[in-house]
Amino acid sequence: MTKWCRNRRALKTNGYLLQHCWKCRSRMLKERQPATYVLNMLRHSAKKRKLPFTLTVESFKEFCLQTGYLERRGNQPDDLTIDRIDWNDGYHIHNIRVLTHEENSEQGGDNTPREMREPDNDNEPF
């Protein structure tokens, strides 16, 4: 059992007990193998958006070592995030890069750089 588990043991639908619930398994993976945890989160995001995903654990670990992504990822404006270069393409090693949250937000929701967007001529707040 882990220190996080609230239900102590998770009961499977077929009746046997697991040592750890799925939330605890995810937390342990995040602590012990952060690259695999992040890769699983990216895979889940790609699956939700129905995007192709060809990243492997080895290639992603090499990418993280080269960019320092795992050490600097987070939710602050200066922390790093994974960005797809071509937003029409999926998650491939040649199509991902690291950006700060601030840089990623400046791109906008449709990945169009600010300098290429049409100016907003409405000066009214509503």
Image (tube, rainbow, N blue to C red):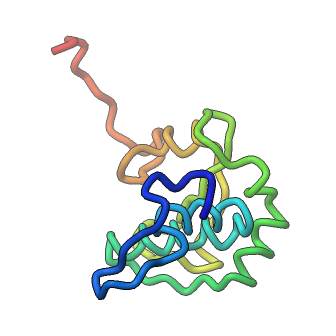
Please state the horizontal and vertical placement of residue 90, each as a whole percent of the image. Answer: 46, 77
Task: State the residue in front, 90 or 5.
Answer: 5
Report how many numbered discs are placed on residues in the image.
0
Task: State the residue in front, 24 or 10.
Answer: 10
Above or below 79: residue 52:
below
Above or below 67: residue 13:
below
Most extreme residue toward the top is 124
Above or below 110: residue 12:
below
Task: State the residue in front, 73 or 77.
Answer: 73
Task: State the residue in front, 125 or 78.
Answer: 78
Please state the horizontal and vertical placement of residue 73, each as a whole percent of the image. Answer: 68, 49
1 vs 31, left or right, is left
Please state the horizontal and vertical placement of residue 44, each as a whole percent of the image. Answer: 43, 71
Please state the horizontal and vertical placement of residue 54, each as a whole percent of the image. Answer: 55, 86
Q: Say which residue appears at 76% left-offset and 66% top-offset.
A: 64
Most extreme residue toward the left is 126
85 vs 64, left or right, is left
Q: Say which residue appears at 65% left-offset and 62% top-offset.
A: 30
Q: Where the N terminus falls, by quadrant?
A: bottom right
- In which quarter of the view is residue 119 placed? top left
Above or below 22: residue 102:
above
Q: Say which residue appears at 68% left-offset and 41% top-offset.
A: 79
